[in-house]
Amino acid sequence: MPNFITYYIDSMKYLSEDVHSEITDVLDSQYPAKSKLNLITKKVRHLISKGIDTGLEGDKPKKGSSRAVFFPKDKKPVTVDGVNTSIPTAIKIAFHGALDNDTGSPYLLGEHQNEHEGDGMHQFHAIIRNIHDRGYVTNHDGVVAPVLSNHPEHHWLEMFRTPDISKSKFKQLTKTKDMPNGMDFDRFSNVIMNDYDLSLGKRPRYSKDKEHDAYMEHPLTNNVLYFSANTGTHPGDITTIHNWGVFTHPVTGKESPVIRDYGYNDTVAKLYHKARYSNKGVFS
C-alpha cells in the first residue's frame, strides 16, 4: 500500500540535460507560473533564430485548456528493473487559460493538475514507479504514465512521453485469455462511468449489455477503477481516448495502454465547474 513505500519524484533533478540551459533557467526561475509559457516560447524562438539547438522539438508546444506540452528531442537516461536505459519525455507547463480568472483559486488550473499528477498517491499507480535507491521498477498493475521530475510549486512536470492510442490499438492491447478480442474503448468507458454513478448513489447512465461482467472482470478495468477511487480522479479524464497513450516498456518493449493526462480529480473538477458557471454566457 502507498503508506508503506515512498514513491519518489526528484524535484531537484530538473529536466533532461539536453534541454538548453536558458530554457530550464526560465522554467526554474522565480517568475510566476502564468508568465512562464510566454517567456519560454520567446526564449525558444530566440535560440532558434540564432541557430542554437534548443533540445526541443519545434518552436510551438501542443496546448490544452490549461497546460502546454513541449517534447525534448533526446531520451532521458533512467534505470528500470536494474537495467540502464533511456526513455522519451514530455514537459507539461501550466499557463493562464480562459477559465483561470474565475476559479477562486490563487493557483492556475494547470498547477493544480500538475500537483495531482505528480503526488505520491497518483504515482503509486504509475506503470513504472520510482522508488528510493532502486530506480524505476515495473508495476504490472499500473495504469498511468510516470512523472519523472517536477517543479516544487507545480509550474511544470516532466512525464514519460506516450504516443496517441487509437480505439483499434486499445482493443488490440487489451486482449486477454478470457477476452481474446480485447475491449471496445467506448464500452469500457460506459462501464467506468456506470461504476462512478453507482459510487454516488445514482442510477447508472448506460444499460448493461451481455459483456458487462466480462468488462468488469478485465484486469485493466479493475486497475483503473482502483486508481480512480484511490486518487479521486474524475472519470471524465479516463473515458476520453485522447487522454490515453501507448506505453512501450523501455526494457521489454511490451506495449500497454496508459492514462497520460490524469490531473482532473474531484478538486480540479469543482474548480472547472465554478469557472464555467461564472462564464456560462461564454462557455454555454
Image (tube, rainbow, N blue to C red):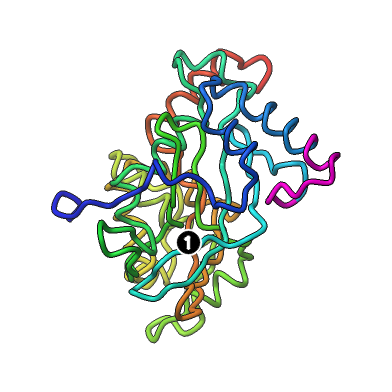
Which residue lies at the image location 50% right of the left edge and 51% below the top edge? Answer: 159
In magenta segment, residue 197: no
x and y percent of residue 178 in the render?
A: 37, 83
Magenta region, main secondary structure? loop
Which residue lies at the image location 47% right of the left edge and 51% below the top edge? Answer: 238
Which residue lies at the image location 62% right of the left edge and 71% below the top edge? Answer: 168
Give the side of residue 216 with respect to residue 114, left or right: left
* Mark 1, secondary structure of its residue: strand
Give the side of residue 255 with respect to residue 63, left or right: left
Count the labels in the image.
1
Give the side of residue 103 with respect to residue 199, left or right: right
Q: Residue furthest left?
A: 4
Q: Is residue 255 or residue 76 the one in the foreground?
A: 76
**Relative vertical location of residue 253 with respect to residue 120 in this rendering, above or below:** below
x and y percent of residue 17 in the render?
A: 56, 52
**Range shown magenta:** 46-57
Read off the residue under disc 1. Answer: 258
Q: Is residue 247 or residue 53 the one in the foreground?
A: 53
Q: Is residue 284 visible?
A: no
Amino acid at dot 1 = Val
Which residue lies at the image location 34% right of the left edge and 73% below the top edge? Answer: 81
**Relative vertical location of residue 244 with respect to residue 98 in this rendering, above or below:** below
**Relative vertical location of residue 275 with respect to residue 15 in this rendering, above or below:** above
Q: Quadrant of the C terminus?
A: top right
The answer to which image quadrant residue 215 occupies is: bottom left
x and y percent of residue 85 in the render?
A: 47, 72
Q: Is residue 179 or residue 9 the one in the foreground?
A: 9
